[in-house]
Image (cartoon, rainbow, N blue to C red):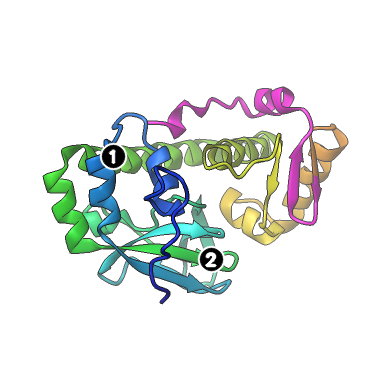
Amino acid sequence: MLPVPGCFRDFEERYPLSLDALITRVRGAPLVSADRDALASTVTGIKTYGRGETIFDSDKCPSHLHVMTDGWAARSISFKDGSRQITDFLVVGDPCDLSALGHGSVGRVTALTSASVTLLNRSALAAATVAHPRLASAFLNIALIEQSTLRIWLAYMGRHDKATHLAHLFCELHARLRRVELVGDHSFDLPLTHEVIADATGMSGVHVNRVLQQLRRDGLIRLHRHHLEILQPQRLRDLAEFDPAYLFA
């Protein structure tokens, strides 16, 4: 485990990047300086993980809330035959395990790349949410956004048009990454293999490849070395029937 970095990015020059990104997720419960200070006071360190390592498992009682600081991770449910269903992707600012605050969680969180998380002490965070109601509302809003996102994923899973499904996933990731300033124009790093995309969409790896080729032929995207460029944003949004309202509290 690494110590909490002494150099904080300018959020007011006082908050770690992961907490900065976490706070930017919340619109319905704006936090004042005292709330942010209380949140920052619960940080105990930063922990790094290699690709494929488990960050969180719902079978274990967490002592900390893990907030993504760097890299990508996936929340998933595994089955006895060795397969898994990915139910969400996690990027900078995303909490991995809201069960630490009693919101409940199923499955595990696995690093898809080298990743680091900021650790927030569970007991201290629980006390902070009692003392600072806006902080409690902020985490409730995030939990509600996660539920809304899962419902959207389930709805698109049942669609027969897989190009629409994959287009929606790309639009969602673009919106989420733009919120934490990880998008350049309409392009962003996408370190997801065909197998990982398949586990998230219910397609086979072969089908994912075919749909990607279709989106390329239609001039909607360019994907090269895990970097995705959206060439025609409005056309992609139209294909996806994308409405980002569910991503914001």
Q: Give, as a three-letter code, the residue at label 2.
A: Ala
Could one spot residue 108 in this view of the protein?
A: no
Magenta stretch containing residue 237, yes or no? yes
Q: Residue at x 39, y 72 (%)?
A: 3
Q: Nearer the viewer, residue 33 or 234?
A: 33
Q: Nearer the viewer, residue 145 or 20?
A: 20
Magenta stretch containing residue 48, yes or no? no
Q: Where is 211 relative to 60, above or below?
A: above
The mark nearer the N terminus, 2 or 1, is 2
For the C terminus, give its image quadrant: top left
Q: Which mark is residue 138?
A: 1
Q: Residue at x 18, y 47 (%)?
A: 129
Task: Give coordinates of residue 184: x percent, y percent.
Answer: 69, 40
Residue position for label 2: 115
For the N terminus, give its image quadrant: bottom left
Residue farthest bottom in this picture: 1
Q: Compute the Cα span from label 2 to label 1.
A: 24 Å
Task: Give coordinates of residue 145: x percent, y percent.
Answer: 38, 38
Locate residue 201 relative to residue 152 in the image: left or right.
Answer: right
Q: Which mark is residue 94?
A: none
Q: Secondary structure under badge 1?
A: helix
Q: Residue at x 27, y 40 (%)?
A: 33
Q: Which residues are magenta?
A: 223-249
Task: Give coordinates of residue 111: x percent, y percent.
Answer: 53, 66
